[in-house]
């Protein structure tokens, strides 16, 4: 019986479910930033991020689905693009600028974990980063400089950081970089 317990303890890390790892996101069409394809470490599956009401060009409501994890991203207040929330799998993630009217650094929290996600260079939205000893590393950057259609993601966050929080950070990077108007 003791051999079984030792064997089970050795296999437990191998049997635990690993969290999805984000690899990239690309605009589905070259002339539109309302539909996105999300790439993960599962090469057989793609996710999506889409504006909810594309005919109305309402940028305040988005929906996503990544390998069966779905949710929505919405502004907290209708006419205020500086406070957002992600609703997914029972999680609520809040996003707001760390400093008033400074959209280069955001506070992202699910009330258990708080992260500060920011641009690498304050005057350039092509690269966003977070690096902590406690939670790991997450960066998203444009494949080509000043071209917000294709993004590469390096996702080395630990299991404490939910897919909802990763989608929040991914959304903040692309939304604050794409042209609007």
Image: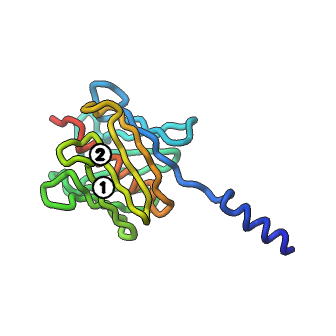
Residue 59 in view of the camera: no
Please tell me which residue is depicted at 53% across the width and 42% down the height of the picture. 41
Residue 27 in view of the camera: yes
Crowding at dot 2, Cα within 10 Å, few <14 / some 14-19 / many 20+, comes out as many
Task: Say if 72 sits above or below 38 in the image.
Answer: below
Q: Work out whether mark 2 precedes mark 1 in sequence or the reverse, and give the earlier one.
A: 1
Could you give the CA–CA distance between mark 2 and mark 1, rounded to whole angstroms? 9 Å
Mark sitting on residue 36: none
Element at label 1 = strand
Q: Quadrant of residue 37?
A: top left
Task: Give how far across and how far down residue 25 sits, in percent.
Answer: 39, 38
Task: Give how far across and how far down residue 33 sits, in percent.
Answer: 29, 33
Crowding at dot 1, Cα within 10 Å, few <14 / some 14-19 / many 20+, comes out as many
Badge count: 2
Left or right: residue 67 versus residue 1 is left
Left or right: residue 154 versus residue 60 is right
Q: Residue furthest left?
A: 101
Judging by the rendered image, the residue that carries numbered circle 1 is 117
Task: Give how far across and how far down residue 81 sits, in percent.
Answer: 19, 51
Task: Say if 96 sits above or below 34 in the image.
Answer: below
Q: Quadrant of the N terminus?
A: bottom right
Please tell me which residue is depicted at 24% across the width and 40% down the height of the picture. 177
Judging by the rendered image, the residue that carries numbered circle 2 is 173
Q: Quadrant of the C terminus?
A: top left
Q: Are marks 2 and 1 in contact (CB under 8 Å)?
A: yes
Please tell me which residue is depicted at 73% across the width and 68% down the height of the picture. 9
């Amino acid at each position: 019986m003791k051999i079984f317990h030792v064997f089970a303890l050795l296999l437990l890390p191998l049997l635990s479910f690993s969290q999805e790892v984000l690899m990239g996101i690309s605009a589905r069409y070259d002339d539109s930033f309302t539909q996105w394809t999300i790439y993960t470490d599962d090469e057989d599956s793609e996710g999506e991020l889409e504006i909810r009401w594309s005919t109305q060009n309402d940028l305040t409501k988005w929906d996503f689905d990544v390998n069966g994890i779905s949710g929505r991203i919405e502004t907290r207040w209708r006419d205020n693009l500086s406070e957002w929330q992600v609703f997914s799998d029972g999680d609520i993630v809040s996003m707001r600028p760390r400093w008033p009217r400074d959209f280069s650094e955001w506070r992202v929290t699910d009330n258990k974990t708080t992260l500060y996600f920011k641009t690498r260079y304050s005057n350039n939205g092509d690269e966003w980063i977070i690096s902590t000893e406690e939670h790991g590393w997450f960066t998203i950057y444009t494949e080509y400089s000043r071209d917000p259609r294709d993004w590469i993601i390096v996702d080395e966050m630990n299991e404490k950081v939910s897919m909802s929080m990763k989608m929040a950070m991914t959304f903040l990077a692309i939304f604050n970089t794409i042209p609007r108007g």
